[in-house]
Image (cartoon, rainbow, N blue to C red):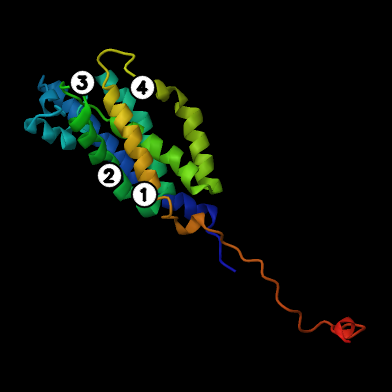
Amino acid sequence: MATNPGPNDFLQEAKNRLRWPMLLVIFLWIIQGFQFLVHGQLGALGIYPHHLSGLKGIFFAPLIHGSWGHLISNTIPLFVLTLILAVFYKRVALISFILIYLGTGLAVWLFARPVYHIGASGVVYGLLSFVFWSGVFRRNIRSIVLALIVTILYSGFIWGVLPVKEGISWESHLFGAIVGILVAFLFRHSIDPDEETRYSYEEDEPTDERYFFDRDTFDRH
C-alpha cells in the first residue's frame, strides 16, 4: 500500500513552489518602479500587431503596465493562478506557463487591433482558462475542485473577453483564454502522481482461518 504524504510534506512542497510566482510578481513591480523613477514609457515594448517591430512585445508586453492601478489589478490573480499551477500541476507547470505566455502574445500579434498591447492580463486569462478547463478535461476530484474555486473567485472576468470597455486589450483576454483551453487539452493526460489513485484494496486470500466445512464443499458435484 502506498504511503500518503503528510500535511507537513505538502506545506513544505507548497513553500518551495511559492518561490517562482512570488519572484514573478516582484519582477513586475521592479519594472514598474523603474518606469516610475525615470519617468519612462516602456509601452513601445508592447505588442504592435502585424508589424515586425511589434514582435518583441510577445516577450516583453506582459512585463509592462501602463499604471500602478493596472499592475495592482493583475498582481493578485497572477500570483494566485501561477501558485495553483506550480503546486497542483507540477508536471506541466513550466511548459504550460511558457506556452500560455508566448501563445497569447503571438495570437495578439496576428489578430488584434494595430495598437500597442501591454500588461499581464492576457497571461492571467490564459492561466484561469487552463485551470478551469483542466477540470473539464481531466475530471478528477482535485482538478474539478480547483476549477470551481477559480470560477467562484474570478467569474466576473468573463466580461473581459468582450470589447465593452475602451482602452482595454480585450483581445489579449480572449486569446489568452483560448490558448489556455488549448494547453489544458494538450496536457489533459499529463497527470501528476498525487492525482492518481493511491490505494489498492485488493483482498488477500486468508491463509490461517479455519472453516467448519471445506471451502469447496458446495462446489463439488
Q: Which residue is mark 4?
A: 160
Q: CA distance from mark 1 to mark 3?
A: 33 Å
The type of residue carrying mark 3 is Gly
Please report the residue visible at 44 percent of the width from the left and 52 percent of the height from the top.
12
Residue 72, percent across and down? 31, 24
The answer to the question of whether label 1 and label 4 lie on touching residues, with beta carbons closer than 8 A, is: no
Q: Earlier in the sequence, mark 2 or mark 4?
A: 2
- Circle number at residue 66: 3
The type of residue carrying mark 2 is Leu
Residue 90, percent across and down? 39, 52
Q: Which residue is mark 1?
A: 186
The answer to the question of whether label 4 and label 3 lie on touching residues, with beta carbons closer than 8 A, is: no
The answer to the question of whether label 2 and label 1 lie on touching residues, with beta carbons closer than 8 A, is: yes
Residue 208, percent across and down? 79, 84
Residue 72 or residue 191, whichever sits in front: 191
Q: Which residue is mark 2?
A: 99
Q: Is label 4 or label 3 in front?
A: 4
Image quarter in which the N terminus is found: bottom right
The type of residue carrying mark 1 is Leu
Q: Is label 2 or label 1 in front?
A: 1
- Toward the right, the furthest residue is 212
Q: CA distance from mark 2 to mark 3?
A: 24 Å
| Vertical comparison of 90 with 48: above or below | below
Image quarter in which the C terminus is found: bottom right
| Element under disc 1 | helix
Q: Earlier in the sequence, mark 2 or mark 3?
A: 3
Q: Earlier in the sequence, mark 4 or mark 3?
A: 3
The answer to the question of whether label 2 and label 3 lie on touching residues, with beta carbons closer than 8 A, is: no
Please report the residue visible at 45 percent of the width from the left and 55 percent of the height from the top.
191
The answer to the question of whether label 2 and label 4 lie on touching residues, with beta carbons closer than 8 A, is: no
